[in-house]
Image (cartoon, rainbow, N blue to C red):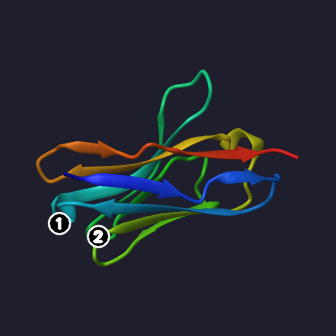
Amino acid sequence: QVQLVESGGGLVQPGGSLRLSCAASGNTNSFAIMGWYRQAPGKQRELVATTTRGGVTAYADSVKGRFTISRDSANTMVYLQMNNLRPEDTAVYYCYDRTWGGIDYWGQGTQVTVSS
């Protein structure tokens, strides 16, 4: 059974930084893509960033140059370093994994609030 647990969310002022972490357990060798999505109130869930086992990364245009995704070699942790945060980054952030077989797993989410 795969489990994803996020941590690191919180309240931060505009221009500040946060680092989100996601701990994966279970059959982590099956993970092909790991990443982060977010969902703001009243909006659809949207892609933030992904990384493949080969290290190829992709980012939403809105976070390019500000956010950095990384993962450990054991495929058990994925991180999202968020710099220069803006009020529009406020959302619940979800950790996401897709297996080689196309099965998606989601964490419970962690709240990020950017406000002065």
Find residue 84 and report its image quarter: bottom right
Vertical relation: 19 (above or below) 36:
below
- The amino acid sitting under disc 1 is Asn
Residue positioned 28% across, 62% down in the render: 25
The answer to whether the residue labelled 1 contacts the one labelled 2, judged by CB atoms less than 8 Å apart, is yes
Few, some or many residues within 10 Å of mark 1 (<14, 14–19, 20+): few
- The amino acid sitting under disc 2 is Asn
Residue positioned 58% across, 56% down in the render: 64
Residue farthest to the bottom, as pictured: 73
Residue 48: image x %, image y %?
Answer: 50, 48
| Residue at which label 2 appears | 75
Few, some or many residues within 10 Å of mark 2 (<14, 14–19, 20+): some
Query: Would residue 33 be seen by someone viewing this image from the given angle?
Result: yes
Numbered tag placed on residue 96 in the rendering: none
Vertical relation: 43 (above or below) 63:
above
Residue positioned 33% across, 61% down in the render: 24
Residue farthest to the right, as pictured: 116
Residue positioned 29% across, 70% down in the render: 75
Q: Is residue 112 left or right of residue 68?
A: right
